[in-house]
Amino acid sequence: MKLDKWDVSILKAVQKDGRLSNRDLAREVSLSPSPSWRRLHALEEAGVISHYAAVLDRHKVGLSIMGFTHVTLHDHSSENVKKFDRAIMSAPQVLECHATSGGHDYMLKVVAPDMASYQDFLSEYLLKIGVVRTVNTSFALKEQKSTTVLPLDQ
């Protein structure tokens, strides 16, 4: 989908505040409400806006540990990859999973209430999938930046 300046303005506005009313959105992007609504709806229908969500403070809900877990599989057979993918999709501790290039096959972003809970996830879940050869985790000591806003002016 080719985005024009109005689409980009709408996307910037809803990234900052997904709860904007159509009237407030129209005012923010300098359009009247009807074209603003039509453009927003078209962006949703095209899948440019995949969904809306509330962003929670993980510390305030008791998830103080965040780790970036690098996983290497025993082998890359279709069966092993599918087994790993299914297991990861059903693990609520895993916020993100990326297949990566380099020395590891995947990088997971994992949250847990404490180190004991992370250790349980590792030993009682991840390593028991049966297809994981190695796991290396780096824990976040301090969060310098966290955003869901994509840079649309690139």
Image (tube, helix red, strand yellow):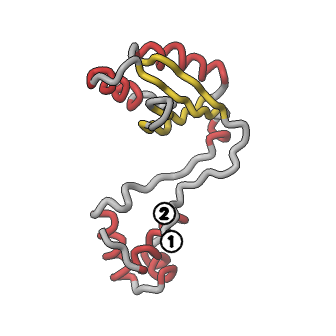
Q: Is residue 19 visible?
A: no
Residue 153's tag is 1
Q: Residue at x 58, y 54 (%)?
A: 147
Between 82 and 13, the residue placed more toward the observer is 82
Please state, as top left, top right, bottom left or bottom right, where the N terminus lies in the image.
bottom left
From the top left corner, tell me how far across and down residue 132 is, in percent: 44, 18
Taking the image as shown, residue 41 lies to the left or right of residue 16, namely left
Between 152 and 114, the residue placed more toward the observer is 152
**Alpha-carbon span between mark 1 and mark 2:** 19 Å
- What kind of residue is marked 2? Gly
From what the image shows, is residue 25 above or below residue 94? below
Q: Secondary structure at mark 1?
A: loop
From the top left corner, tell me how far across and down residue 57 is, in percent: 63, 45
Number of residues whose C-alpha sits closer than 10 Å to that of mark 1, classed few (under 14), some (14–19) or many (20 or more): few
Q: Secondary structure at mark 2?
A: loop
Q: Residue at x 49, y 26 (%)?
A: 71
From what the image shows, is residue 23 above or below residue 97? below
Q: Is residue 38 visible?
A: yes
From the top left corner, tell me how far across and down residue 16 is, in percent: 55, 65
> Farthest front residue?
102
From the top left corner, tell me how far across and down residue 137 is, in percent: 60, 27
Quadrant position of residue 3: bottom left
Residue 18's tag is 2
Q: Residue at x 67, y 39 (%)?
A: 59
